[in-house]
């Protein structure tokens, strides 16, 4: 079975380490916050200028001046700091964020990512995504492995305009966890009950299947 | 302190000198920390042909979105412009020009503009459409593109508190682009929720020192919330 959104978030959360500063994109990445292990202290960065994003407020603590990058009202946790947008992106671009999780339309074997623009459709903008992929050392892309019509999104070469070039090394799809090395996807883990054959079929870019591929457990 | 007293009494005075075809830098992220009354004053003045530099362009009927209704904006420089039907319509009809800029690059363009740095290299956008026509240079084996900084004829800024000297503090994430815009305007106008007596704001807590600020005005704010989200 393909992973649910919650399972994808759970799997990403296994990459967290105690003491990490983490930037979570909108969508599935946001859900990762729900699976931070209780014995770990992880600080979430929101690129509008908040390091130490807390939970959503109550009606009583709701504050129009306290939002996250998705423009939702949030709170600041103990130990948080607030700063301007240049400072926020200095953290991101300067490589100070330990883990970045974001979505994509396509990735390819060269580590290119396309996530912001579909020609012919209205372009709303890249927001902070280009800065995040250019600045982070450790990025996990979360995405569906193939389109609803079965077309692979893991490609020999991205067909859409890029968000960043050569910056992606880790990809979690609803079918598999893969790494990108030397111009190929390397299959590391399969979703429970998903066959290696299905992953081969749905991966258009060069795929290497090592002998020790694991099956994820939840 | 007469010469250093930045206070003005009316919004008309606050934007005195704003004319057609000027460049206006605006603080705010979404609808958080936007100079809502200064935007209303721009609308009231009816100036046209503006280039507006801001992370976003408001929503229909609020924030910078109100300047679209009378077609006052000729060009928008922003990182994300969703949430606005009139914006889409003007963009698709060619009435409005848009320069999409990565958010961190936009922030740095304002910071650099205010700091007297004409351009800088960044890896952000290399290999993407953002790099089209820009100089590429390699440092330590990595490719960077040259991005030019931004200054404005006016900067419109939303602060929390200011004193008579124009020293400003911001509240929570309403800070965002505001301190950056404040440094990069030829004329920087800050509207705040409260003007306090000199000495009330401690020197070590000032976010924007008064040297960057030309005019301060106190206003009342709606502070509309874009995505009200509360705990279940």
Image: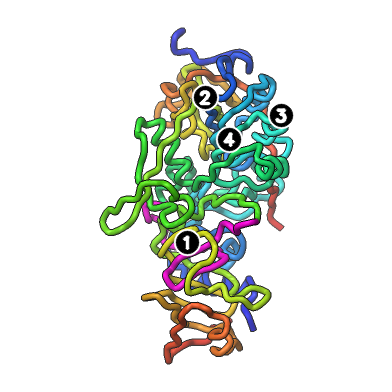
Q: Secondary structure at mark 1?
A: strand
Write down the chain letter for disc 3. B
Write down the chain letter for disc 2. B
Instruction: Please tell me if label 4 and label 1 are on a single chain.
Output: no
B135 vs B183, left or right, is left
The label on residue B154 is: 2
Q: Residue at x 68, y 46 (%)?
A: B83
Whole-Å distance between the Cαs marked 3 and 4?
14 Å
Quadrant assignment, res B192: top right
Whole-Å distance between the Cαs marked 4 and 1?
32 Å
In the rendered image, the quadrant that contains the N terminus of chain A is bottom right
Label located before the other in sequence (2 or 4): 4
Estimate the x, y position of residue B30 in percent, counting from the top left: 62, 42
Nearest to viewer (mark 2 / mark 4): 4
Mark 2 residue crowding within 10 angstroms, few (<14) / some (14–19) / many (20+): many
Estimate the x, y position of residue B104 in percent, counting from the top left: 46, 46
Q: Give the residues in magenta.
A: A92-120
Q: Is residue B52 visible?
A: yes
The label on residue B70 is: 3
Whole-Å distance between the Cαs marked 2 and 3?
20 Å
Q: Secondary structure at mark 4?
A: strand
Q: Which residue is mark 4?
A: B75
Q: Which residue is mark 1?
A: A100
């Amino acid at each position: 079975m393909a992973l649910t959104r919650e399972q994808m978030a759970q799997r990403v959360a296994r990459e967290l380490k105690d003491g990490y500063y983490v930037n979570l994109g909108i969508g599935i990445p946001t859900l990762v916050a729900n699976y931070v292990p209780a014995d770990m202290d992880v600080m979430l960065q929101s690129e509008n200028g908040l390091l130490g994003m807390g939970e959503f407020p109550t009606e009583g603590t709701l504050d129009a001046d306290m939002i996250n990058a998705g423009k939702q009202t949030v709170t600041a946790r103990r130990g948080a700091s607030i700063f301007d947008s240049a400072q926020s992106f200095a953290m991101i671009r300067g490589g100070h964020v330990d883990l970045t999780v974001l979505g994509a339309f396509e990735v390819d074997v060269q580590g290119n990512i396309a996530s912001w623009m579909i020609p012919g459709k209205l372009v709303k903008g890249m927001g902070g995504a280009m800065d995040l992929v250019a600045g982070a050392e450790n990025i996990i892309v979360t995405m569906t492995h193939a389109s609803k019509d079965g077309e692979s999104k893991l490609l020999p070469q991205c067909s859409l305009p890029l968000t960043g070039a050569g910056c992606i090394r880790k990809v979690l799809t609803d079918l598999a966890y893969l790494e990108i090395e030397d111009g190929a996807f390397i299959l590391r883990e399969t979703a429970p009950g998903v066959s290696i054959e299905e992953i081969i079929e749905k991966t258009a870019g060069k795929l290497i299947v090592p002998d020790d591929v694991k099956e994820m457990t939840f | 302190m007469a010469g250093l007293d930045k206070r003005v009494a009316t919004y008309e005075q606050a934007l005195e000198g704003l004319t057609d075809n000027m460049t206006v830098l605006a603080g705010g992220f979404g609808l958080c920390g936007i100079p809502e009354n200064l935007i209303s004053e721009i609308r009231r003045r009816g100036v046209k042909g503006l280039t507006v530099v801001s992370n976003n362009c408001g929503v229909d009927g609020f924030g910078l979105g109100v300047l679209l209704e009378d077609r006052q904006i000729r060009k928008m420089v922003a990182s994300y412009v969703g949430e606005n039907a009139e914006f889409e319509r003007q963009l698709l009809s060619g009435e409005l020009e848009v320069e999409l800029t990565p958010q961190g690059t936009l922030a740095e363009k304002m910071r650099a503009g205010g700091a007297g740095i004409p351009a800088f290299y960044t890896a952000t956008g290399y290999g993407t459409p953002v790099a089209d026509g820009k100089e590429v240079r390699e440092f330590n084996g990595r490719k960077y593109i040259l991005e030019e900084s931004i200054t404005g004829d006016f900067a419109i800024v939303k602060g929390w508190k200011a004193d008579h000297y124009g020293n400003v503090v911001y509240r929570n994430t309403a800070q965002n682009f505001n301190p950056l815009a404040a440094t990069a305007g030829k004329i920087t106008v800050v509207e705040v929720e409260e003007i306090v007596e000199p000495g009330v704001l401690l020197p070590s807590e000032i976010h924007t020192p008064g040297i960057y600020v030309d005019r301060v005005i106190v206003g009342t704010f709606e502070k509309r919330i874009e995505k009200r989200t509360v705990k279940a």
